Image: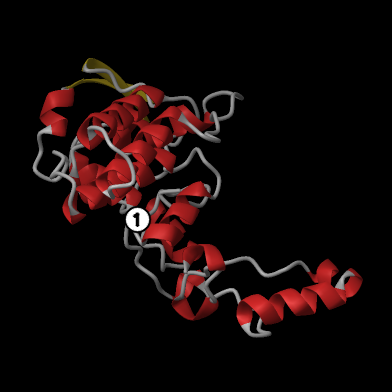
Amino acid sequence: MVLMHCDFVLQQPGLILLSALNDLRAMKVADPARGLGFADTSFKSFVGASNGEDVSTMGGKVVAGLYSPIGRKRYYDGYTGENTFIISYPEMCFNIAEGINRGWATGNAEDWYTKGIKADFSFYGVADGANTVSFLRTTAPGDYINYNITFNYNTYLNQPAVKYAGNNATGLQQILTQRYLALARNSGFLAYYQWRRTGVPAFLTGPGIGNSGAIPLRWQYPSSELSTNKDNYTAAVASQYGGNDNINLQMWIIK
């Protein structure tokens, strides 16, 4: 889940959030980090890498079993790619919940918040009741071990960290957190764009990000604009960014 991700390891904060909430989506998108010594079906076995680490460090920790690799059964067992959300039903539910929470619309924010969570569970095949999760048994491709797990929606939704706190700052944080989890790994850059807009959830940063450890806020204009459309490019950069086409400057849409 963009849990922020590279191709072999899931990263914080998404997997950390899923594990902390005893969220079965963790086991749908990742394999256990067996070097930690916990059972395959313990949420303690699902640990994401820090976004601030470089890829070589992540890779070493995955090999050592300290980080969870991407779920091989879901993402590599066959040739069918993951469906991509453009404007999905879960996202729409969280949009409506956020609008009500912020006072932009009327209605019951908790109802829409709950609908969004349940819809995303459905996308990942998480049923209310009996579930099967499959993890790679060894390093041999296609050699999976299956576990039967019971998951209860009401138990999940009534956890203090999940149960909607009302139309206040805490409730908004809950909506935005679940929205991020719903967009992760299936929506291109949309999870990043939502983080950029809201700051939720917080990312650990560091040298692996480059850019002096800061997450960029925008794309630079392509070089072709400078070579083929210089006058308009210069005017746009002057108008928006004081003449500095810098990836760390805020776009108008997030000011």
Q: Quadrant of residue 109?
A: top left
Left or right of residue 115: residue 229 = right
Would you call the spot at circle 1 few (<14 residues within 10 Å), some (14-19), or many (20 or more)? many
State whether residue 217 is above or below residue 140.
below
State the quadrant of the N terminus: top left
- Using the image as rendered, state which of residue 161 and residue 53 is in the foreground: 161
| Amino acid under disc 1 | Gln
Residue located 49% across and 70% down the image: 209
Vertically, is 177 above or below 54?
Answer: above
Instruction: Let me know if residue 46 appears in the view.
Output: no
Q: Kindly give the residue lying farthest to the right in the view shown.
A: 228
Residue 104, position as x, y percentages in the image = 33, 46
Can you say whether 194 is above or below 45 in the image?
below
Question: Residue 40 location, x and y as percent?
Answer: 24, 35
30 versus 81 height, above or below: below
Q: Which residue is mark 1?
A: 12
Judging from the image, the colouring scheme is: secondary structure
Kindly indicate the quadrant of the structure image that contains residue 13: bottom left
The residue located at (28%, 44%) in the rendering is: 175
- Residue 198, image x, y percentages: 37, 59
Secondary structure of residue under mark 1 = loop
Instruction: In this rendered view, identify the residue nearer to me: 194 or 47.
Output: 194
Q: How many marks?
A: 1
Tell me which residue sits at (85%, 77%) in the image.
231
Q: Residue at x 42, y 36 (%)?
A: 91
